[in-house]
Amino acid sequence: MSPTNPIIQQVTERVAERSRASRTVYLERIRREGSLARERGPARAHLGCANLAHGFAAASAEDKPLLRGSAKPGVAIVTSYNDMLSAHQPYETYPGELKTAVRKAGGVAQVAGGVPAMCDGITQGRAGMELSLYSRDVIAMSTAIALSHDMFDATLMLGVCDKIVPGLLVGALHFGHLPAVFVPAGPMTSGLPNKVKARTRQLFAEGKVGRDELLDAESQSYHSPGTCTFYGTANSNQVMIEVMGLHLPGSTFVNPHTELRHALTEAAGARAVQITAHGEEYAPVGEVVDEKSIVNACVALLATGGSTNHTLHLVAIAAAAGIVLTWDDLAELSKVVPSLTKMYPNGQADVNHFRDAGGMQVLIGDLLDNGLLHGDVLTIAGRGLDHYRSAPSLKEGSLVWEEVTSGSSDLDVLRPVAEPFSADGGIHMLEGNLGCAVSKVSAVKPEHLVIEAPAKVFDDQLQLLRAFEAGELDGQDFVAVIRYQGPSANGMPELHKLTPPLAVLLDRGQRVAIVTDGRMSGASGKVPAAIHLSPEAADGGPIALVREGDLIRLDSAAGRLDVLADLSERVPEGRALSDAEWVGTGRELFSAFRRMAGHAEHGASVFGVNGAESPTHGPGLGFAAPAGFAHSEVAE
């Protein structure tokens, strides 16, 4: 194994130094709670009799005596099950399976609570999408409510998609003395090829096929229980959680309802018992998630060209562990982390193809061997990321792990560090006189990485769609500026519905791009885009000063975003909707979130940095970075 790459090491040290005060406070708290747990035994043993009686009143005849007693560790199951979301439908049977596995391992499990799980695929382009990012923090709070009963010694987290996994992890980290095992459900089997699906969407945008043809294509692509197979936010979640050591090794991309999936689920339940404070392998989640594992997650995101949503979520997850991660850290890492995978929208393969090419074990092993991951970390599988070189399989009905020593079996999908698809990561950070932003370049052709063109300004994505349908965007180069889409304006919705029409124009030979303070998701595709622009228009960001026809220069290769106009005498145009206007689909219930949300570059969260003494206040009432933090901070 090579020594750690110098830039990886420098960024990690910089993160640790920046976070020293808040991380110290956080660790002191969870270590104190962990020591108490070791001394006092299972948590529920210290509840009052009335409290405890409420806690086991509805338990089965088999579990009630175990819960009444104080010998068996208690394990909380926090689930995002619903049967509308394909990714979460398999969780219907997990509580029973996990309870049995925990009981066999010497513990007792209960479903402590449920968290909401909304689907960005269903809400895309609709009012419900404006609640999507806020749902991450609601999920974190729901997780805290589930764990607040003080009945538990470990947690099993059931979640897969977009905001659900980051929300569960943020919530779990606020109970950082408890081990947390994340239990994946796996991707659906491969359906309609992604290339065909994308082409059908463009044909529909052009009016060349009808709704029935489009619905046929979509339903052949999204066709069964399991995660959608393209490499969006959900599957990026899964990659990062495994690299952070919160999944059992190799469990990420095993399909639902298979014997191996069932065996891994049982093993996850047993492992949660083994790593409580009452055993010999204590692995509290607040110690597993440290500066090194956060950097490892960043490396995995970059090496795989993962979802841009994680430039928000990783910052928020780090903050929950008392760690301050910045976009500048991601930018530095991106310079030395090569792009090693081609999964749609970055290529035509899906996550099943990636798994079959060698998957997580080959990826992690190669990154470790080349000094691009920290190997000396705590994981739920034990000390050291080398555990994650091994793949699970069933032999004579028993679950075993064997180290994978071979390389990729399909170099069109997964490559070694020595032969990357590109020398740097698939996500670039941008700066300029419009602020700071994120650009996913892994799916963008090199000739489209730089564009200088007049601005076409929209204050709503529907305005752009109507302009496309009316032919007003035909035959011209332009940069679409879509503003008032940030976290404090309307919840920072994904604007993925804009990709098909703009891809049509790109294919016609027009030079087009997007600049927005909204999101584009893990499926942003081939249209060059500067997203998550911060500060946002609703907080007085320069994007509110851009006028129709201003020249915009987006240079994703060089990391620059500028408007070539004098903004000094201008006043903002347009506005976010008022609370009275921002109603329907329950949005009015989240008005407080609009006032609380911090900047995108600080995670767009309503929470501060855990352990920070006096975090500064962001726009409105929201928490931004800890005191003393400034964007573009550099190492001394």
Image (spheres, helix red, strand yellow):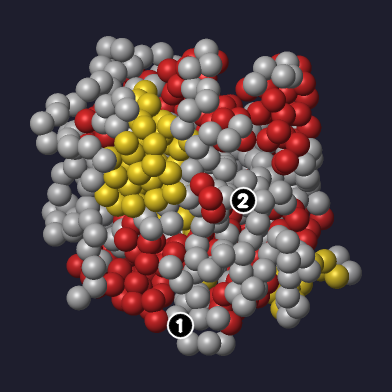
Q: Secondary structure at mark 1?
A: loop
Is residue 344 visible to the viewer in this orientation of the structure? Answer: yes
473 w.r.t. 238: above or below: above
User: Is residue 315 visible in this depiction of the protein?
Assistant: no
- Which disc number belongs to residue 92? none
* Residue beneath the point at 26% across and 31% down: 546
Q: Which of the pair 575/526 is nearer the observer? A: 526
Density class for disc 2 (Cα within 10 Å; few <14, some 14-19, many ≥20) is many
Q: Residue 85: x and y, percent?
A: 63, 33
On the image, the x and y values in percent for residue 83 come to: 66, 31
283 sits left or right of 65 in the view: left
Question: Which image quarter is the C terminus in?
Answer: bottom left
- Residue type at tag 2: Asn
Q: State the count of labels.
A: 2
Q: Nearer the viewer, residue 17 or 258?
A: 17
Which numbered marker is on residue 346?
2
In x, y percent, where is residue 349?
Answer: 72, 51
Vertical order, 202 against 560 (above or below): above
Residue in the foreground of this view, choosing between 525 and 62 = 525
Q: Which mark is residue 4?
A: 1
Residue 189 image-quadrant placement: top right
Q: Residue at x 54, y 44 (%)?
A: 522
Q: Is residue 544 left or right of residue 374?
A: left
In-front residue for pair 18/160: 18
Which residue appears at 16% of the width and 44% of the height? 617
Left or right of 586 on screen, residue 395: right
Quadrant in which the N terminus is drawn: bottom right
Label 1 environment density (alpha carbons within 10 Å; few <14, some 14–19, many ≥20): some
Residue 120, by quadrant, is top right
Foreground disc of the pair 2, 1: 2
Marks 2/1: CA–CA distance: 28 Å
For badge 1, the amino acid type reads Thr
